[in-house]
Amino acid sequence: MDLNFIVGGPQGGGVETAGLLAVRALSMQGLEVFADREYHSNIKGKHSYSHIRASDRPVGSIKYPVDFLGALDAETMATHFHEVRKGGIVVHDAAIKKRVLTKIPSMDVRRAERLRESLKANGIGNSVGELDDWLERQGITVMAVPFGEIISERAGLSPPMIERAMNTALTSALLLSAGVPINTLVAAINVLFRDKREAAQLNAAVAKSVGEEFERIAVAREIRLPRIINTNYKKEGRKMLVAGNDAVAIGKLLGGLRLQTYYPITPAADESFTIEQHSELRNGLGETIGSPLVIQAEDEIAAICMAIGGALAGVRAATCTSGPGFSLMVEGIGWAGNNEVPVVVTYYQRGGPSTGLPTRHSQSDLLFSISSGHGEFARIVLASGSHFEALNDAIKCMNFAERYQLPVIHLLDKGIANCMTTIAPPFLNEIDRGDRFRGDGIYKRFLRGEAVSPRAYLGEEVMWYTGDEHDEIGHISEDPFVRREMYEKRMEKREKILSETKEEDKAVLIGEPDYKDLIITWGITTGAAADALTELNSFGHRVSVLQVRMMEPFPNELVESYLSEAEEVICAEANYLGQLAELIEWNCGIRLEKRVLKYTGRMITQDEIVSSFNRVKNGERRITLGGGE
């Protein structure tokens, strides 16, 4: 079972709630889900949608074409009608049938031009009703349901409440068309509105009313609706339904975070909001064991400096940001590198440069995260490829920071931040706080001879910190011999990290070890590549996926060993240059010419991996993708 849904409408019109309801209901039905939320950076009016995939096996990506399209408005129909497969189902409010597709005020000018060309080329009229007729001729079932009448007459709601309930009505019809039982839908509504009893009752009444009328319409039109029955699916224990921001927040809390600083920025801010909601941490006995402090700083410069101060004082400290904010943090990160401060920066990539695409996906900050800051200093850059990894890596990053006393950049992307999926509960990772100084006499904070010196917290010993070069006590020094000793001490951490880090934290092979072709990737694109393996190998290929996780220090020997076993290597990532491919050439001296790239602000999908692989096999070397709206 592998179902793909799109539910869309105007931003601020309940689209996000509709997506959350659909995801919740499908997961409660026992399915694995992966949902991408696409939204504009304005507050209200522009087209927004959720692309939801539900399967009886774990999935880490979306794919096209979709099986079900739910439209709250005419713009959703105009934007996504061409993405529905033959045999699929489209559901929308009957009230929009007379809307003119070519006169939608909120539609982007270039998209409107493409729409007019598409309508003309396919011989489709200008109204939603005429588009419905064309879709029916293509073998797609269109269910135009009078939601307003149903909500008013059956659910007994007055006109002001009809618009507020329209998202529940549409989602109910969409899920019913996929075979989700009404009792599962109502249960999902009760969970989604568990803190709003009146809203839960209202939306449940709407769902039931829509269910009754939808069944009647289906019978009248002789449409046979499917039924989701998971006879071959065993649920392996309890699952968590999380967005990436939430997963990282959970990981930080489990890992002992005590200070989180931030300045609000998309798509990073939700992580701090989640941590703010948990003002008390309790153990298994229900006893309070601590309380995380969350500070909204006046800007990102203050956020990184506050986190550094917390780390120097001895608490596990972190901050989170996106590209523009990280740019402001760079000087602070350099100070932390010079002073061997264990601070974590959770970095969510989005479309750049400058403000760029604030709410869209990108993997274009890899090289920036590795080289940010003038001079040279040791750091760790760890890139998660899934929500499960993001949660557990949040703990690992704090461990790495304190074990090796250096800044750690936890590199994520908008795809992980805002997508929702089902994951297993996290591992209870051991907390590693590194070596503590406990001694007498003069405290040498930067003791020579070891890459990592014993660490004392502010107030425990007399110590000095400075942005200048310094000796082992911390006093400013420009002596060339001291400079060399301190420089090498800091940089030698890189070799120590590579020698001590587990292989699965450096790179992971997905698939069989006797591969012939290798797709190498990172971040959320890993999910699309991994999901494509079954289909690719069913064609007779021998393909595996290599996910690179540790970007700095780079595990060149390990990556080289995997590359040497492949006859053909394809690098897939969401940027223009192929930054991972460039990093591999930089560190391994191997030029990867075959690159699959996407920089539209939308994620690479499973079907794009499959089609791109076949294009490479047919001789193409650089493939630029453009799918998704």
Image (tube, grey):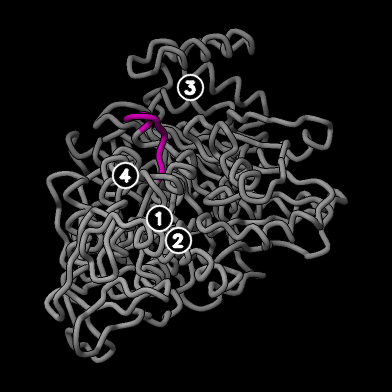
- The nearer-to-camera label among 3 and 2 is 2
Mark linked to residue 215: none
N-terminal label among 1 and 2: 1
- The nearer-to-camera label among 4 and 2 is 2
Disc 4 to disc 2: CB gap under 8 Å: no
Who's the residue at 58% across and 21% down the image?
133
Give the percent coordinates (x, y) of residue 600: 50, 29
Who's the residue at 79% across and 37% down the image?
614
- Which residue matches tag 3? 78
N-terminal label among 4 and 3: 3
Residue at disc 4, secondary structure = helix
Q: The magenta stretch spans which residues? A: 349-357
Q: CA distance from mark 4 to mark 2?
A: 22 Å
- Mark 3 belongs to which amino acid? Ala
Decide which of 212, 450 is in the foreground and name it. Answer: 450
- Mark 4 belongs to which amino acid? Phe
- The nearer-to-camera label among 4 and 3 is 4
- Which residue matches tag 2? 491
Residue at disc 3, secondary structure = helix
Q: In the figure, residue 230 lies in which quadrant?
A: bottom right
In this rendering, the answer to whether 251 lies above or below 82 is below
Give the percent coordinates (x, y) of residue 31: 54, 62
- Which residue matches tag 1? 377
